[in-house]
Amino acid sequence: MTNLPVRLARWSAHHPWRAIGGWFLLVAVCLGVGLIVGNNSAVTADYRVGEAGRAETIAAEGGLHRRPVEHVLVTAVDGAELDQRAAAAAARDVAERMSALPVVAAVGEPVRAEDGNALRVDVTLEVEERAAAQVVEELRARTEAVAKDHPDVVVEQTGRASIGRAVEEQRGQDIARAEMITLPITLLTLLLMFRSLRLALVPVLLALSAIAASIGLSMVVSHVFPDAGVGMNVILLIGMAVGVDYSLFYLKREREERARADGRLPAAAFVDLAAATSGRAVVLSGLAVAVSSATLYLVDDVIFSSLATGAVLVTLVAVVSSMTVLPAALAKLGAAAERRAQRRKRPVSTPRESRFGAALMRGVGRRPGLTLVGTTLVMLALAAPVLGMRITDMGPETHPRELAAMRTFDRLTGAYPEVKALHQVVVRDGGAGAGEALGELRELALADPAISEPATVRTSRDGRTHVLDLAVPHFVGEQEAQESLRRLREEYVPATLGAAAGLEYAVSGDVARHVDYPRHQRERLPWVVGALLLVTLVLTAWAFRSVVLGVVGVVLNLLSAAAAIGVLTWVFQGRWAEGLLGFTSTGSIGSRVPLFLFVILFGLSMDYQVFLISRIREGVLNGVPTRQAVFDGTRQSASVITGAAVVMVTVFAAFVGVHLIEMKQTGFSLAVAVLLDAFVVRTLILPALMLVLGDRVWWPARVRAARVPAQPQTVR
């Protein structure tokens, strides 16, 4: 592990143009191959989990899989009374135009609202659910044509496909806006750190090229792990952060070695020295992030598999770039800087030692125990709201009302509450006959105040599979809807279908999906957390030959992640920050957010920990007492840790401005986590803890310069 970065960096530094050309050729190949093989998007079957997923599998095997439905709503202009003739004419026009489309399976009869002020036409699509958003534009074009031809009424379209398409478009716009904010702030931060535009551009360009290569590779990998549409998001989110971070670690060390040498060594030698020290830390950090992210595969869910794939790929590609093209770029830039310095007869500029780090360590050194106790109590206080966290799957009603499809959705559900949600009871008849039992179930369910008409039964061609559709006039996140599902599963279905012999049955539908998805995550959580803790312990203990540091890494990562998720809960479950951050509280946290954050934060926290402890251990191996090594390592690392943190916080905080609530929650909590980890955990708690433990922190190794093979010596 120590020699590989040095060998790669040495070759790259001595063959810079080959390394640079080879890297960009690799990026082009990755993108090209990805475009050739194409992206394999996840299909509806990939999303099935729990009882809801089992029900959908049975229905699909009988040819009764759920088909997407779009709703065309006809209402009066400016709130006036609806002209029934004009509305009926518009509805007929909708039916004629939609029926002509090959993607349309059926067009329902117009349904008049109870108050008579709206008319609804249901359009059932021939495609499967996940593909509906890709074809919905054809329907929207027909709806807009009807609206233009019937100006005396308002004709609008909504549905899950329309909303999904609008959400995708909004997500793309938000990400583009976030990147426009991130890039200039990142460049400015790096420019202030290195006082060189060339050096500031290097991390950004490398991060962007790593993102490009990862996007191409993700298309290839999607044929093994189907893409749920979130892989690109995590590649952009994590890629810029770790790509800049790893470049910063290298750059900072290269400039330090240049300052020590005072012009007595060639540019390539500084790259060798940086690779022998920071290069190892980058490899360890990248390995930790990648392996931590890979634990998301244990969730056994297509969305988390996509998140894991994106995070693993972009992290490993960023590590490869830092081990190959970065040393080459530094060697070329270093040689050019030396030539300019000789012409101007001025030394090459180097980063100044952090005054912040020195002042911080003076305070920690005077009261390490008090610092440790005080900061830990603060972090525990921030983590306390986790105990009251409520996790739900975010239904369509949580999407921003800036989307036209959502405003139409509100008008639709206001006029037709029965379209808010659906229960689906799927039955496979083993020969005893399900008709009578389904009839009893229908009557029993319709007596429930939270279930309403229409209540229809669909039967497969072979007569063995049946689906009972029950309307739920409540949104999936409402207590009434979830209680009706509980009664249906625990009371009505066992009393009817359960009493009949030879029937296989399960309950699905909108509410069941909403409930079963978080439940599935909770069931997989112990496996993910256990694997994550084990990975962190083993990697840290192996990297630093210390079981104590392995345990310390696990505890501090838990503290950092818990505090960040606690702040997330405090902010987003309440209403006090709605105006400040621009969101409408759902009183809950998106079901995918906490688990994704927990895993990613464990990996990202390792970045600063590995870099800081590497500097401290390097001093100890060179004969410096542990106490002094903690002071020196923290002081030397403070500027790069704070600089990297500023870049990461900028990247993540830019996503707080997006419209989609789960992306907003993710960006916010990642930004908070990096702030806490960089400015509290790694620069206060970790040094204080190491000062309190002293030499015991290296147990079971006995770290002494005389007993441990010396690291490559730096020029003094």
Image (tube, helix red, strand yellow):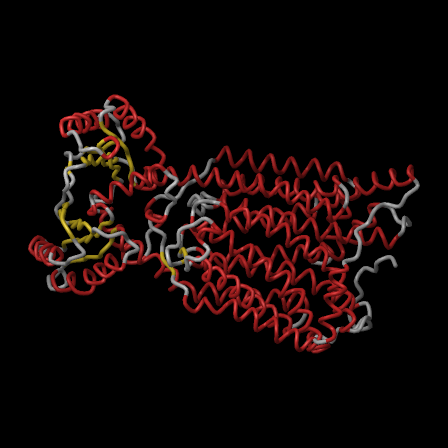
Query: Left or right: 213 with respect to 275?
Result: left
Residue 272 visible to an observer of this rendering: no
Q: How many numbered circles does the render carry?
A: 0
Nearest the viewer among 671 and 414 is 414
Residue 669 coordinates in the image, percent (x, y)? 51, 56
Query: Left or right: 171 with respect to 369?
Result: left
Q: Residue extending furthest left?
A: 436
Residue 282 coordinates in the image, percent (x, y)? 67, 55
Residue 29 coordinates in the image, percent (x, y)? 59, 35
Q: Residue extending furthest right?
A: 345
Say which quarter of the image contains residue 135: top left
Is 654 located above or below residue 491 in the figure?
A: above
Q: Quadrant of the C terminus?
A: bottom right
Say which quarter of the image contains residue 403: top left
Q: Residue extending furthest top?
A: 149
Nearest the viewer among 591 and 582 is 582
Is 242 located above or below residue 36 in the figure?
A: below
Residue 160 visible to an observer of this rendering: yes
Q: Quadrant of the N terminus?
A: bottom right
Residue 653 coordinates in the image, percent (x, y)? 55, 50
Nearest the viewer among 40 and 421 is 421
Query: Left or right: 83 with respect to 145?
Result: left
Is 432 located above or below residue 228 in the figure?
A: below
- Give the residue at x 44% y 47%: 225
Say which quarter of the image contains residue 526: bottom left
